[in-house]
Image (cartoon, grey):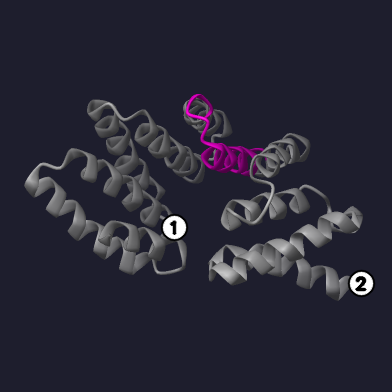
Amino acid sequence: MRTSLAYLQSLTGQEAEALHGLTAVLQTHRKVGNKMGEATTLNYLGVAQRRLGDAAAAMTSQQLSVELYRACGSPLGEANALLELGRSQHQLTGDTTQALATTEQALRVFRELDDRVSQAEAHNNIGDFHLASGDPDAARDSYDQALALIGDATVPMELARALEGIACTYPPATRPPEATRQLRQALSLYQRLGAPDGTRASALLRGESQTA
């Protein structure tokens, strides 16, 4: 429970609190020899570290998480850690090739397990990597795949990311009305979640209103 709470904090702008809580939980798992708990906590710790801007520390935590999950025989856990490791690799190095390879490794496991939500998250990550590397067409294809996998608001964070991502693949001056509608929907979802991720969507919409 404490691990889940700290992870939630890391997603809602309370990264420092999450880092403190996860560090304490990690010490407890190591003290009692709970390897699965240690692996999960290390992955979540990496998320908090990355969101605080320390991608190098995040990569270290998540690589350890991958190794522990593998030793415990948990392919889903390993894939979850690989998914986050790919984001940390991209943030630290900007190397799209490495980040894509890591994320696609996770995606293969999610497909084998028919985990549609995690597949959508992986496609959103891949879309982000392509968008950052200047390939909006490949990014849009990935976001469309994420959207097809979830399709409604049952997974609001990944739905918001896919909708926002699609809109961001168009230059503001030529963005179709449907993409602007999707951007507004994404912002509404972020606000409902209390997630700081909606900053980009809000800025894009403000920019459009100022130039209209």
In the image, 26: left or right of 175? left
Label whose residue precedes the other's in the sequence (2 or 1): 1
Q: CA distance from mark 2 to mark 1?
A: 33 Å
Q: Which residue is mark 1?
A: 51
Q: Report x, y in % for residue 208.
A: 84, 68
Report crowding for label 1: few under 14, some 14 to 19, many 20 or more residues within 10 A (C-alpha): some
- The answer to which quarter of the image holds residue 211 is bottom right
Q: Residue at x 84, y 73 (%)?
A: 209
Q: Is residue 199 above or below residue 124?
A: below
Residue at x 77% of width, y 68% of height: 205
Q: Residue at position x 75%, y 48% from top?
A: 166
Q: Is residue 98 magenta?
A: no
Residue type (three-letter) at the residue carrying disc 2: Ala
User: Looking at the picture, how far across and down is residue 49, in whole percent?
Assistant: 36, 55
* Front-lying residue, 163 or 203: 163
Mark seen at residue 212 = 2
